[in-house]
Image (tube, rainbow, N blue to C red):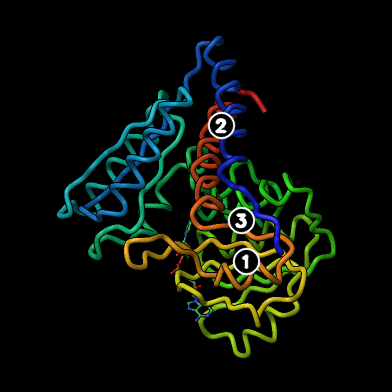
Amino acid sequence: MAEILDGKALANTLSEEIKEKVKAMSSNGIKPHFCVINIGDDPASKVYVRAKKRRAEKLGIDQEIFQLPAETTEEEALALIQKLNNDPQINGVMVQLPVPNHINSDHLIEAINPEKDVDALTAANVGRLWQGTHFVKPATACGIIDLLDHYQISLDGKRAVIIGRSNIVGKPLAALLLERNATVTLAHSHTKNLTELTKQADILVAAVGKAKLVTADMVKEGAVVIDVGINRIDGHLVGDVDFDNVKKRASYITPVPGGVGPLTVESLMQQVVALTRRQNGKS
Ligand code: NAD
């Protein structure tokens, strides 16, 4: 039976570390300040944005929400990003996705100053991620590596299979696992014979958004299974993994909720602190 990878407990520990760092900065007169731009009325986005604000407040980080109406034009959103880029009081900027269809989210992300790019999604920061010269990391991928490290799960030489190739989860996680000498395969909606690949995985990550996509027969005995998916079924949150059956085969597994999710928010705050330190000449 698999050991549970308790993301919530680790998030609480990390939170204490971040609080200490923020306190140390404040004694030097520095307070991290980051801005989230949320355009339109997506109900899930509003929940996420509020959750981030609550978390930031607990850690002593200033978070400002710019809630813009759904009719906001791309030009107006770009003008706001420029204003925030140019404001020396602001250390981090992010655009909550998704944005309304008439706005190209790539244009907004690319307009963010890479030095303030909390989500690490600009081309410059994606390039640095793959070069191994990054100073900011995408939060979810960073949280997953922290969780594996916390449980001392070695990655060197391990075969990692990630299902899902999005810019926010699958691709950055592939870069970070590669950096740690794992042999990485990215699977996606066009992948053929998915089970053939997943059965070889020492580390199996599901980041798709389909409940019970990963069943026990797809998992190698003793594998480490990381479930990134968030699906709402009959009012309950479930991941992409058939947890009850897969946990009988895996050596470690993340629950949903309480696994990757809480770490993502914590990791985001770590990125805000890292960018603030960097802007203030601290490594
Ligand atoms: P996305 O929709 O951008 O990407 C989904 C990926 O899954 C795509 O690469 C697609 O090719 C692949 N895919 C779709 N169907 C597939 C199939 N049948 N077989 C194999 N691959 C398939 O999603 P995303 O933004 O990367 O998010 C993925 C999931 O993770 C969602 O449920 C999202 O809510 C969740 N998520 C959780 C956190 C967290 O903190 N826990 C953070 C980000 C995203």
Which residue lies under the disc numbered 2?
15
Q: What residue type is labelled 2?
A: Ser
Q: Which amino acid does label 1 sit on?
A: Val
- First reached walking from the N terminus: tag 3 or tag 1: 3
At a point 22% along the width and 47% down the height, the residue shown is: 76
- The disc at residue 235 is none
* Residue 78 located left or right of residue 22: left
**Cα separation between marks 2 and 3:** 28 Å
Q: Position of residue 39 (x, y in %)?
A: 25, 50
The quadrant the N terminus occupies is bottom right
> Is 161 located above or below residue 13 in the figure?
below
- The disc at residue 205 is 1
Residue situated in front as seen by the camera: 88 or 141 = 141
Pointer 2: residues within 10 angstroms few (<14), some, or many (20+)?
A: many
Quarter-of-image position of residue 231: bottom left
**Cα separation between marks 3 and 1:** 23 Å
> Is 174 located above or below residue 120 in the figure?
below
Residue situated in front as seen by the camera: 107 or 209 = 209
Quarter-of-image position of residue 203: bottom right
* Disc 2 versus disc 3: nearer the observer: 2
Under tag 1, what secondary structure?
Answer: strand
Which residue lies under the disc numbered 3?
127
Q: Which amino acid does label 3 sit on?
A: Gly
At a point 43% along the width and 31% down the height, the residue shown is: 56
Residue lying furthest bottom: 193
Residue situated in front as seen by the camera: 56 or 247 = 247
* Residue 22 located left or right of residue 67: right
Q: Where is residue 173 in the image (x, y as percent from the top left)?
A: 62, 59
